[in-house]
Amino acid sequence: MAVFTVGPIIGSLVISFTDWNLLSEPGWVGLDNYARLATDPEFINAVNVTVTYVIFGVPIFQVTGLLVALLLNLVLPGMRIFRTIMFLPTVLSGVAVAVLWQQLLSSEGAVNQILRMLGIANPPAWLTSPGWAIPAVIVIGVWGVGAGAIIYLAGLQNVPPQLYEQATIDGAGPIRTFFAITLPMLTPTLLFTVLTGIIGAFQVFDMAFILGGPKGGVGGSLSFYLLYVWGQAFGNGRLGYASALSWVFVIACAVVVILILRTADRWVFDESESR
Amino acid sequence: MTLQTIGRRRRPGTRTIAWRAVAYVALIAMSATILLPLGWMLTTALKPDFAPVFTPTPQWFPTTDWEWNNFARALLDPARPFWRYTLNTVFIVTMNIVGTVLSCSLVGYAFARLRFRGRETLFAILIITMLIPWQALLIPQFLLFYNLGWYGTMLPLIVPSFFGNAFFIFLIRQYIRSIPVELELAARIDGCNQWQVFRHIVLPLIRPVLMVCAVFVFLDSWNDLLGPLVYLIRDEDFTVAIGIANMVTSREPHLNLLMAANLIMMIPATLLYFLAQKQLVGGIASVGLKG
């Protein structure tokens, strides 16, 4: 265990202060790699792409995941079949899903044909038009939202039924019940899915590699951060610079996670406190 | 109060029926959104080379063309031998499952039952390693394997699994702690040694959690793109994921073969999903792995 994790961690930090590229002897460059980030337009673009995806993608995935879970939580005949179908994309690989959607979202693809049938004359070219590339990736993410829905569903089923009975007796309608009972009781689940959702959104790789190719799509519109790190390390062989990139990434993720956890006790319902 | 609630339940008024109808419409719409793209893929995979893939109205279900031969062509294509890629992937996946189950059950058992000095400290270290993001490890691990001379072989994709995985060790340890210790004590009294207790008492009891681990290891390594992309260089070592990625990036014209290859990639996971659905969905819900 230690050989494969702790040692490399220290190694990685050391490499990030060098200009190593496998062929030459590593030379110590101090903080140069980190200083260079500020003036690297491709780095700034990769940050932009990734942050845009996180800011728009994560809330959309959370809301749709929760809506799907609410629907799947109903007690109706045949629900098992619907649940089976909804969770199916969870097991399918990022690569295969990306390949499928690349075709569906091509400019003459099935999605645009439907949009034309619905009367939209000039649907976007999605993956090949820079402004539409991230929305396209979000659309694909919504298709696979079943993974988050499973966790929400588990959370929903842990809400004590007495609370709902009490609410019905008190005359609360379905919408009131949702905001007064379901949502507060679901906040611990929400904290978990938001955290894993953000971490997952930061780590997009397979999708970006397939949809935009190793260079990150038209005009870098799909140059997600990890794809850029991979390109620098294994495409250009700049191991020192790529190590610095990874460390910036790890620290940025840690800061975001800590910020969310810090605010958590203000909005997450804690069973043990209310007693 | 009670009368009112009973009264409400007995009367499935028009409102309830209307709500149910809305729910069913939404559920069917959702299912269609999931299934139609998959149907389109199958339809495309079954088309002959000359048939238009993008028909004016998208074809969601195979109706006219049934070129099952495309699967064989994708598998046997000399330029991209997917049968070879599939064998490689199956080999890597199997080794990963064996390695993870072996190492993690042994270590998990040790953490749960054996008393040795520094156990709690070691366990704390293990948990901390779970928090270290793999992005920080990618390059140094690459250098480690490069210096070992393993670059360009499958070893970097297999060997680490034999050294355990913090998350699965944790899962197995928790599971072992939840089973009563009396059985193991009885076996000891009957003269079993530590290994026999593990082999004949503990291992059969923890089969459910090992199943969950195996399923997750399968999905992780079957779907892995980054690892093979970094370490594999020779075509005969490639995995299915790389094969498909290369097929896409080289923009080959035969969309039907691409979709056939893609289906070959999806089928094992789908089969597993239907076979192990209960463990899988329960497992995802309890441990909260992202998809």
Image: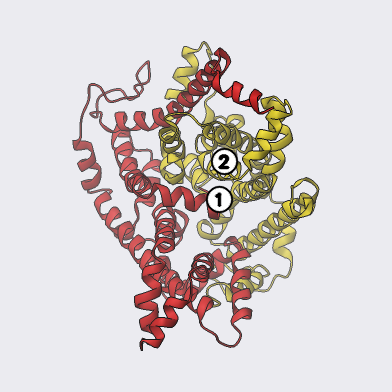
Q: Colour of chain A?
A: yellow
Q: Colour of chain B?
A: red
The quadrant holding residue A19 is bottom right
In the rendered image, residue A210, in percent from the top left (x then y), is placed at 46, 43
Characterize the local packing of mark 1: few (<14), some (14-19) or many (20 or more) Cα atoms within 10 angstroms: many
In the rendered image, residue B34, in percent from the top left (x then y), is placed at 44, 31
Q: How far separated are the C-alphas under marks 1 and 2? A: 9 Å
Give the chain of mark 2.
A
The quadrant holding residue B35 is top left
Q: Residue furthest front?
A: B3
Give the mark, 1 or 2, whose residue is nearer the N terminus.
2
Where B56 sits versus B199, above or below?
above
Where B291 sits versus A64, above or below?
below
In terms of depth relative to the viewer, which is nearer, B206 or B41?
A: B206
Q: Residue at x 39, y 41 (%)?
A: B248
Residue bearing the label numbered 1: A227
Question: Dot 1: what SS?
Answer: helix
Q: Residue at x 39, y 54 (%)?
A: B222
Residue A106 is tagged as none
The amino acid on which the numbered mark 1 sits, given as a three-letter code, is Leu
In the rendered image, residue B220, in percent from the top left (x then y), is placed at 44, 55
The amino acid on which the numbered mark 2 sits, given as a three-letter code, is Leu
Colouring convention used in this rendered image of the protein: by chain
Image-based side of A119 in relation to A26, left or right:
left
Q: Residue at x 46, y 40 (%)?
A: A87
In the rendered image, residue B102, in percent from the top left (x then y), is placed at 39, 72
CB-based contact (under 8 Å), mark 1 and mark 2:
yes
In terms of depth relative to the viewer, which is nearer, A118 or A50?
A: A118
Give the chain of mark 1.
A
Residue bearing the label numbered 2: A222
The quadrant holding residue A238 is bottom right
Q: Residue furthest top?
A: A119
